[in-house]
Amino acid sequence: MAIAKAVPGKTLLTPTDHTLIMIDHQSQMSFATKSIDAVTLRNNAALVAKAARGFKVSTILTTVAEKSFSGPIFDEIKAVFPEHNIIDRTSMNTWEDERIAVEVNRIGKAKIVLAGLWTSVCIVGPALSAIDQGFEVYVIADACGDVSTEAHEMAMQRMIQIGARPMTSLQYLLELQRDWARSETYDETVRTSIANGGAYGLGLIYAKTMFGASEGH
């Protein structure tokens, strides 16, 4: 018989149990992205980056052929991590770069969260590789994009079929917070939600302006 306990499920993410890898959020990669518009993609990438910074999540930033072809990482990410080391690769599959393996092993987390361009190449590659090596993989679907909606959706299905767990950008932020009584991250979570949380952010502005709402804080 199952017994209810007031504790979170083991598959829910916490700030300390995973490594976030943001992959190839670059100009050239976004030009051909059609499954999500560039404005929404940049906003969601910013939301993910801010969530990672606010909760001190172990984060790896990586680009492909930055200077010769694909261009710099989105300013929305660079502004959040101005001093962060960005690993520039030649391999389409991030997981095949030895420097990434070294960094993942140095951090030592069993869960990997992925976001980037394109879903069918640069996210499928590390997702399948990491799962094959025993990692739990999560994919932030709306911080990814591909050359067509079909390409993105088929890539998501392929990853899900072998055990990857899909989620969204706002879900990622709120799953890390998970309790409005957590005062140490409350203000940062609200700021990020207001700046990049779309209609939810507008709701927070309205509630705070009209009647001083502060959730359960």
Image (cartoon, rainbow, N blue to C red):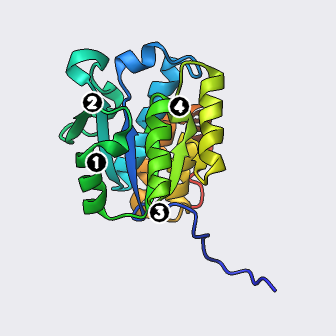
Label located before the other in sequence (1 or 2): 2
Q: Amino acid at mark 2?
A: Thr
Q: Residues within 10 Å of mark 3 (few under 14, many from 20)?
A: few
Label located before the other in sequence (2 or 4): 2
Is residue 135 at all visible to an observer of this figure? yes
Q: Which mark is residue 120?
A: 4
Q: CA distance from mark 3 to mark 1?
A: 16 Å
Q: CA distance from mark 1 to mark 4?
A: 19 Å
Q: Secondary structure at mark 3?
A: loop
Q: Secondary structure at mark 4?
A: helix
Residue 45 x %, y %: 44, 33
Q: Amino acid at mark 3?
A: Gly
Q: CA distance from mark 2 to mark 4?
A: 17 Å
Label located before the other in sequence (2 or 3): 2
| Residue ID for mark 3 | 134
Front residue of 145 and 80 = 145
Residue 118 x %, y %: 47, 28
Left or right of 44? Residue 16 is: left
| Residue ID for mark 2 | 90
Q: CA distance from mark 4 to mark 3?
A: 21 Å
Residue 1 x %, y %: 82, 86
84 versus 215 height, above or below: above
Q: CA distance from mark 2 to mark 3?
A: 25 Å
| Residue ID for mark 1 | 100
Is residue 195 at all visible to an observer of this figure? no
Q: Which mark is residue 28?
A: none
